[in-house]
Amino acid sequence: MTDGSPALRQTPLRDRHLALGARLVGFGGWEMPLQYSGISDEHHAVRRAAGLFDLSHMGEIWVTGAGAGQGLAAALVTDPPGLAVGRAHYSLIAAPDGGIIDDLIVYRLAEDRFLVVPNASNADRVATELEPRLAGLDAVMDDASAATALIAVQGPSARGILAPLTDADLDALKYYAIVEGRAAGAPALVARTGYTGEDGFELFLAPDTAIGVWDRLMAAGVPEGLVPAGLGARDTLRLEAGMPLYGNELGLDATPMEAGLDRLVKFDKRGDFVGRAALEAAREAGPRKRLVGLLLRGRGIARHGYPVYRPGEDSSVGEVTSGTLSPTLGEAIAMAYVPLSAATPGTMLEVGVRASRVPAEVVPLPFYKRGPSQPASDKERRT
Amino acid sequence: MNVPEDLRYTPDHEWLRLESDEGTVGITAYAADELGDIVFVELPAPGSRLEAGSTFGAIESVKTASDLFAPVSGEIVAVNEQLSGSPELINSDPYGEGWMLRVRLDDPSALDALEDAAAYRTRIGAP
């Protein structure tokens, strides 16, 4: 390492990715598959059938003990003690000034046992922040990120592919629920969560079982239309589904209210939590900006960091946080922070794309919402 | 990776094919592959000028946007109109149907400043 950058961490599935022709890139400190056959192909496969994702870069932090729930309630903006055993919720960890340190999912495995899943790039930071927030309570934190592999099967065919390979009752496993069992030949935590806007499952595994699980899922799934899918498709899928990405839509400079995540902040829960005073003040003052969806009405694609203008004005009023050509819609979509006065759906704005201004309409999020489960033939007819 | 012998290359992965004083310009198979699924190309109008080393347009894949750099100076005599409706031609046939524009070179000897296939192959680490 002559350039001084730390070596990228590798997941247990790296050889499988290389054998499948994946292009590997650095992401959050890990060497991860960006794409295999191509982002569009993989994206469509997840919307129509299923995709198989290696998400072993994600963090896994266990919090255990009689005080675990109380500790997490004081550490996060949500109220984990309110979770039933076997359920999960989406949460945020805030800084004392109300900025967002990370977004994460909290799973409750037992009365006194919680699993916190932060983003790869923030896993160390979240562990560092959590530990002192649990001090003085009967709660032990164990950062198992390096000792946990994570494989996701996402898409309308995910349930049919996984069901014969697991003893978990998938019909009883609700969205945002988790159960311990076996999957594809290995002990696993089977969660019905994901980041694609489709039905799907995430399997938390011991790293030495990951290759076997991957191979079994591929063998069972490929005939059903399953394809390996990389971070590129994961990004276009989550963007269509209107899901925020930390570092793009979320960061220390936006409040949960501005990001449209008001519902997560449980001001009515008992006790203090880190960021409460600042977030109460921010709620009182009202948001300065709002995260919106944009549909581009001219030629061009909005990208992260591009400026947003009111028509005919010289100075920008906002900024694009994420943008792409939506593979599902065939149109350029974006998310952006804009002033409240420009955040109403139907408002016409402009995005600065290189030398030109491209008209963009504020639209409600998400851009894509999956329909109720139905045979594929009916779905075809609907469009 | 396909690097045709009869073309010249820029460090930014454009190629140029010279026929008398006119050259055809596109991006290499390596560049197209790196970009992934190409979904949009922004090209100048015929009649406008190319300045060697300057940006003449942009290319976008699902993943990212990238500038296009002129390999030589000259006047643009034609633009591949097919690309506005079928930008994926750049992925499927980067040296053929995926061509971008034709330019009348100010100075055909400008070609000498570009890399030959062997040098470009070395640049991209191709065998």
Image (spheres, coloured by chain):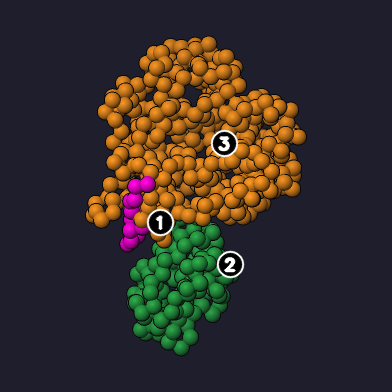
Chain colours: A orange, B green
Magenta span: A346-358
Q: Amino acid at mark 1?
A: Arg
Q: Label 2 crowding class (10 Å Cα cut-off): few <14, some 14-19, many 20+?
A: some
User: Label 1 is found on which chain of the structure?
Assistant: A
* B58 versus B25 height, above or below: above
Mark pair 3, 2: CA separation: 33 Å
The residue labelled by disc 2 is B92
The residue labelled by disc 1 is A297
Q: Position of residue B26 (x, y in %)?
A: 48, 72
Q: Label 3 crowding class (10 Å Cα cut-off): few <14, some 14-19, many 20+?
A: some
User: Label 2 is found on which chain of the structure?
Assistant: B
Residue plotted at (38% across, 43% down): A345
Q: Point out which mark residue A185 bears.
A: none
Q: Amino acid at mark 3?
A: Gly
Q: Quadrant of residue A251?
A: top left
Q: Point out which mark residue A194 bears.
A: 3
* A40 versus A281 height, above or below: below
Tag 2 secondary structure? helix
Q: Are marks 3 and 1 in contact (CB under 8 Å)?
A: no
Left-right relation of A284 to A244: left
- Marks 3 and 2 on same chain: no
Left-right relation of A349 to A57: left
Q: Amino acid at mark 2?
A: Ser
